[in-house]
Image (tube, coloured by chain):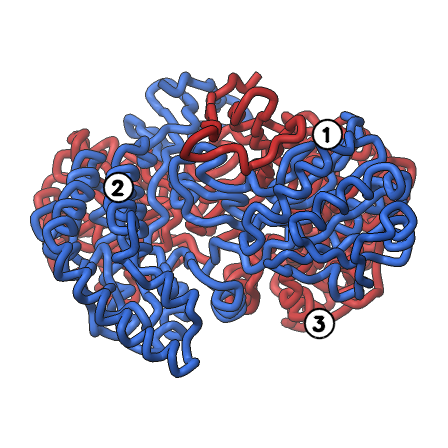
Chain colours: A blue, B red
Amino acid sequence: MSLTTGSAREVAIAAKSASHVLATLPASARNEALTAIHAGLTAARDEILAANARDLNLARQAAADGKLSQSLVARLDLGKKGKWEDMLKGILDVRELDDPVGKVTLRTRLDDGLDLERVTCPIGVLLIIFEARPEVIANIASLAVKSGNAAILKGGKESTESFVAISRAISAALETTRVANGAIQLVTTRDVIPELLALDQHIDLVIPRGSNELVRYIKSNTKIPVLGHADGLCSIFLDGSADPTMAADVIVDSKTSYPAACNSLETLLVQESALSTILPTVATALAAKGVELRCDAQSKAALLKSSPDLKVLDASEEDYATEFLSLTLAIKTVSDVQEAIAHINAHGSHHTDAILTADKARAELFMNAVDSAGVYHNASTRFADGMRYGFGTEVGISTNKIHSRGPVGLEGLMIYKYKIRGGGQVTAIFGEGEGKKQFKHQRLALD
Amino acid sequence: MSLTTGSAREVAIAAKSASHVLATLPASARNEALTAIHAGLTAARDEILAANARDLNLARQAAADGKLSQSLVARLDLGKKGKWEDMLKGILDVRELDDPVGKVTLRTRLDDGLDLERVTCPIGVLLIIFEARPEVIANIASLAVKSGNAAILKGGKESTESFVAISRAISAALETTRVANGAIQLVTTRDVIPELLALDQHIDLVIPRGSNELVRYIKSNTKIPVLGHADGLCSIFLDGSADPTMAADVIVDSKTSYPAACNSLETLLVQESALSTILPTVATALAAKGVELRCDAQSKAALLKSSPDLKVLDASEEDYATEFLSLTLAIKTVSDVQEAIAHINAHGSHHTDAILTADKARAELFMNAVDSAGVYHNASTRFADGMRYGFGTEVGISTNKIHSRGPVGLEGLMIYKYKIRGGGQVTAIFGEGEGKKQFKHQRLALD
């Protein structure tokens, strides 16, 4: 890793050039680099924690002056119990993952002695823009090295001292390996983000790790593909045939197990026929967890009738387009699954949506028609997570409709290339007509 | 299909809404729609060819006035021998392809009764911008219906009458099917392209089919992902160990079998040690096919010495960054494979590049290090083609590093979604610590 003061353009060109070397390194060389990073950070522990303490002091002052939130200060703290150890363990966890480079995903015999292969390879240069959490830098550097991608890192200014110290340690560690210095570069120049976002000739993918505002800003200011999501407006459709206890459990988990997460529930759509039979059980369970219920007129009337003690507020149209990220839930009555599907496709953020129903056919229709990265039947929206899906790591959760979608593991940092190995074949001998050869197009085994 | 005069925004919203229905149709319904389109066009043959004749008349006048090229006039002509039949056969060919929708590509048991599936699904709304060839509209409409995507079509103004006639026939045919009218819309409004390119909220992918200029314009004027390539600057590295006859065959095929194609050779990099041993054979064969050779000083000197009768011109720096699309070839001397790789990565267009060598290790290094969609060993660059790769159809050839790359078949019009089928599971019961469950993450068979 190098700590650069070069221009955005110089940084990007150096990264591209390093990426071409990185792409040719065997898995062993990339894994050895991860071992070296782990050892380097372990050795530099005191220095890094001292730098982090300096960041923390400044941040605490800023927080006292009301210029920074307390939650940001908390995220900054690398000395917090278990954080340092988790960061180091994360590097070794990434090292142990399957090598994503060079996997053959298609093999076709075009003709005798002329074989086509589709092989996974790194995308090239990643630009990772993140906010305050200093441990992200080690995680991202590991993912980049493992996947054979070069990475340009730009972190939030509150963690500058920590980033520089971590970056120095990683840089020294990589010196002893076959991973070129330009492969991982930390940019500390201020206000360089707009310049970096304009370099679509050299940067292949942007990965923002931070607030919705950060992601939204990046998405609207670059032509480089962005892996991520700005919003997580997840909905559940409560069908009239659902089991009330199951529905209450799933909805409470989706809403309350971590309200600030992107995969938490924001809108509950209730079929008319469930208003008096299932909704009361659900609403009572939510209220017991402190959830504020914002209802349309129909669901409000039903709840006031069945559970007069419940506190029920009126929902505005705006509420159905809001990611509350808190213990507030918008509730709306719909006549059937079709209306629920239309509502979700129009108001949702294409992240994760669920149907609760005993009717399997209705569940399949919902899952096919809802245009979201995750579509669930009788399960909590909170399952949308790379670790829970078993991906070993998570690069981010994408609401894009291109390349990768939903929780994205290492696979999302790969593209493929086509290799042909021949013996001097030319295309002119193939075709229709006399004396021309036909392609064999014989599917070969992948192993 | 509908012929629309609505605003770009109305068109896009109607397409998105239709795409959500299209995504739920079974393969049988999509295939029946293709059968109906085929029958509808067959019945409307005379009307369509009459409309095409009107386009042709106007185009011939414009060509006579020097306002249009003769080659464009030729591309317009649907009455040309075999063209109509090929267009109709293409629809049935697409119908016969494997259904790309609903393929399960990952299946994981998260816990008993809680299964995760990754399933292919349509991307959503495609915007296809093409130029004069009227048969493209039938091809694109077929690919969209087959893949379950809605499509907005915008064709060049020279073919307007043909497009409108074809569109009417397809529209009438779709009336009898389950594919909604808004699923395929032809936009005939002038100057609507900039508006369409701004609708990244509603349009998921742009596919330009036309000149380099068109693709370049689109790429620099939209944030919607673009499937395609502006340039095809393909190179071959001629290593000193290559067989001279093989090298001459492959290079002649790559350069001369269709010089205007994007997969044709533009730059030949020659290892120093091949200058006097292999290049003369290659250059003589190229000259016999009428290829103009533009050489650097070193290769020129070598050729003048070995083959004094050859006509050899001086190459400029500009020539190594030029896609000639004609019988002109830039030749440059390099010291070794590393220099060739660096040259190609810096000057090429990441389309298709080849190495000619008897040294397998060198070939593998080249194929891993060259950052292109196609990397070949001892084979013509002209193999880069969806039909030749055995994909059955070709949506385009992409030089992107995201989503799809190289020749793109129906697969390139698909993304995936994650489905979870559960029995009311919540996330709160999983985790570390006492009484918490662990995920099973058991890989299940795909069939």
Q: Quadrant of residue B20?
A: top right
Secondary structure category for the residue under label 3: loop
The percent position of residue B185, horizontal first and vertical second, equals 78, 53
Q: State how far apart marks 2 and 3 are (Cα).
A: 56 Å
Q: State how far apart marks 2 and 1 are (Cα).
A: 55 Å
State the mark number for residue B191.
3
Question: Which residue is identified by label 1?
Answer: B92
Residue at image point 64% right, 28% down: B421
- Estimate how packed mark 3 is, as few (under 14), some (14 to 19) or many (20 or more) residues with alpha carbons within 10 Å: few
Q: Are marks 3 and 1 in contact (CB under 8 Å)?
A: no
Secondary structure category for the residue under label 2: helix
The percent position of residue A15, horizontal first and vertical second, equals 26, 59
Q: Quadrant of residue B169?
A: top right
State the mark number for residue A89.
2
Note whether residue B163 is visible.
no
Quadrant showing the C terminus of chain B: top right
Q: Amino acid at mark 1?
A: Leu
- Of residues B285 and B197, which is closer to you in this image? B197
